[in-house]
C-alpha cells in the first residue's frame, strides 16, 4: 500500500481490535492496489509463519454483515456477536483465551524474528494487527488509534 493511502478510509476497529482500514487484505485496499495480495502473502509468512495464496487474500472485515473473511476460523467474532458487544474491550473477560489467540504485539514479533523490522514492514504487516494496545486505549478513551 502506498504510504499516502493509509488515511483514505475511516478507521475501522474490528471485534478483536485489528484495523481493517490499515490491513492490506481489506477489500477496498485490494481493489486500489491488487499487488497487496502477494505482498501480504509474503509478509504474513515472514512475520507470522503462515502463507495464504495471494488470490485468496481479500476480506470485507468482521464488522460487515455476511462478510467474506480472511480468517474463517476466528474465535473472536462469534463470541463478540453472541455477547452483543462492539469489541473485546467491552467484555468482562477482556483478554480471554480467544483473544489471546489473535493478539499481536510489536515487541513479541521483534523478539521472535530476532531483528529489526523495517518501517514499511511494520506498517504493512504488524501495525494493522497490534490489537492489545489499541483495545486498551479504546477501553480508556473510546478513541481508535493506529
Image (tube, rainbow, N blue to C red):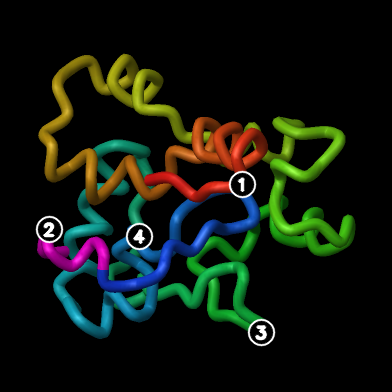
Residue 3 marker: 2
Q: Nearer the viewer, mark 2 or mark 1?
A: 1
Q: Quadrant of the N terminus?
A: bottom left
95, 47: nearer the viewer: 95
Report how far apart the C-alphas of labels 1 and 3 lie in the structure.
26 Å
Residue 66 marker: 3
55, 132: nearer the viewer: 132
Are circles 2 and 4 on residues that touch, CB within 8 Å?
Answer: no
Which residue sits at x=81%, y=42%? 91
Q: Is residue 65 above or below residue 16?
A: below
Q: Is the residue marked by circle 1 packed among few (<14), some (14-19), or many (20+) residues within 10 Å?
A: few
Q: Is residue 85 above or below residue 63?
A: above
The magenta segment is 1-7
Q: Is residue 100 above or below residue 7?
A: above
Quarter residue 63 falls in: bottom right
Give whichever of discs 1 and 3 has the lower sequence position: 3
Element under label 3? loop
Report how far apart the C-alphas of labels 2 and 3 lie in the structure.
30 Å
Are circles 3 and 4 on residues that touch, CB within 8 Å?
Answer: no
Q: Which residue is tagged 1?
A: 142
Q: Nearer the viewer, mark 1 or mark 4?
A: 1
Position in image of residue 51 (x %, y %): 34, 53
Q: Nearer the viewer, mark 1 or mark 3?
A: 1
Amino acid at each position: 500500500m502506498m504510504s499516502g493511502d493509509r488515511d483514505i478510509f475511516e478507521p475501522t476497529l474490528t471485534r478483536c481490535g485489528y484495523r481493517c482500514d490499515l490491513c492490506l487484505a481489506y477489500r477496498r485496499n485490494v481493489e486500489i492496489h491488487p499487488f497487496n495480495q502477494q505482498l501480504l502473502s509474503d509478509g504474513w509468512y515472514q512475520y507470522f509463519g503462515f502463507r495464504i495464496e495471494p488470490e485468496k487474500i481479500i476480506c470485507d472485515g468482521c464488522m460487515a454483515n455476511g462478510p467474506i473473511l480472511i480468517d474463517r476460523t476466528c474465535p473472536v467474532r462469534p463470541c463478540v456477536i453472541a455477547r452483543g458487544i462492539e469489541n473485546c474491550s467491552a467484555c468482562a473477560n477482556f483478554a480471554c483465551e480467544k483473544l489471546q489467540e489473535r493478539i499481536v504485539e510489536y515487541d513479541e514479533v521483534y523478539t521472535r524474528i530476532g531483528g529489526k523490522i523495517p518501517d514499511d514492514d511494520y506498517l504493512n504487516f504488524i501495525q494493522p494487527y497490534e490489537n492489545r494496545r489499541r483495545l486498551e486505549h479504546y477501553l480508556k478513551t473510546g478513541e481508535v488509534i493506529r
